[in-house]
Amino acid sequence: MRWTIFLSVLSIWLAAPAARSEPAVPAAQLSPAVVPGAYEYRLPSRHTGKTYRIQVAAVGPAPAQGYPVLYVLDGDAFFPVAAMAAQGMWMRAEENGAVPMLLVGVGYSDRHFLDLATRAEDYTPPSEDYSQTGDRLSRRFGGADAFHRFLTEELRPDLAHRFSLNPQQQNLFGHSYGGLFALYSLMKYPASFRNRLAASPSIWWNQRRILQEWPAFSGRLAAAGEGRFGLRLSAGQYEETLAPHLPRSSQRQAVLSERAMVSEVQHFGAQLLKPQYRQLSVETVTYPEETHASVALLAIGDGIRWLYARCREDAGCRPPLFR
């Protein structure tokens, strides 16, 4: 609720025209907005063949062991939210239990909120058949392995040249297809990130292709070493049932029921509580009265708080303030 109120007030403030006596400036003469305290650059990838828009915000002073990092997928949309949340909590660091953190938005273009086609390719697992993906908008899929290599072999070293990073505290946030990528990276490459925030993951994609990774996962996790990895799963109530203010639609309800976002997230989280996954700390949250779109905002703010708590529990991450 606290994030809902905060973000609602923020959206009203951002949408309200400023009171001014001079005539309105034509949109063509306005400059792009900038996230305070953030920087951006473009980074090409030899693995994916794409060029990425990288946005970075260093929140707090660099710890002796380097910054914990949070990579934010769909960075064009969600980096400003993540940076605002982390910077806001850092203003009252002791009250919020906040720790220094490097926020990294991974996006595509400053011209689009979401690049639907490109993200669909980058965030989805490779499959033998793409004829029944359940996605009517995109045509290219299956680039998750190449995108993972971009994150770990190209972006991460590039950031390490620019900032002091804690190599043991690399974390990932993804929503929807980004959440699916977070789960795929966990099941295929568990050691590549310490913690993952998977908001409304599209487990339904391509007849639940992600579930094919289960048989090999316990072995991969055991091979990842003794590190304690974390996963925070989340979904919204109205991702499986119609919101009450919507007209009743059997077709829309059928889609929600088939995708079963809440049930799938709950079941996925429950599976990970089995003894063979004891290296993994799992939290599963269902947000009441929230939709697929609104969950992302809550999952970012609450997820950063969860990362703070995970860091404070880890001697290799915990800053002096909490020792």
Image: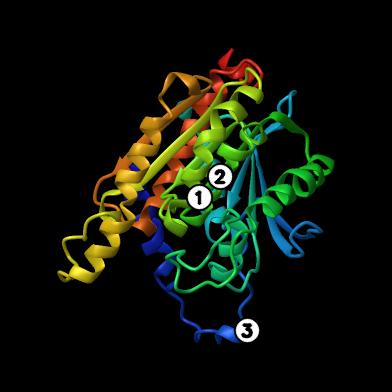
Q: Amino acid at mark 2?
A: Tyr
Is residue 76 visible in this depiction of the protein? yes
Foreground: disc 3 or disc 2: 2
Q: Amino acid at mark 3?
A: Gln
Q: Left or right: where does residue 173 sit relative to residue 103? A: left
Q: Residue furthest front?
A: 128
- Residue bearing the label numbered 3: 29
| Secondary structure of the residue carrying numbered label 1 | helix
- Residue bearing the label numbered 1: 180
The reply to whether dot 2 and dot 1 touch (C-beta < 8 Å) is yes
Q: Amino acid at mark 1?
A: Leu
Mark 3 or mark 2, which has the lower sequence index?
Answer: 3
x, y percent for residue 186 = 57, 38
Q: Residues within 10 Å of mark 3 (few under 14, many from 20)?
A: few
- Work out whether 304 lies above or below 63: below
| Secondary structure of the residue carrying numbered label 3 | helix
The reply to whether dot 1 and dot 3 touch (C-beta < 8 Å) is no
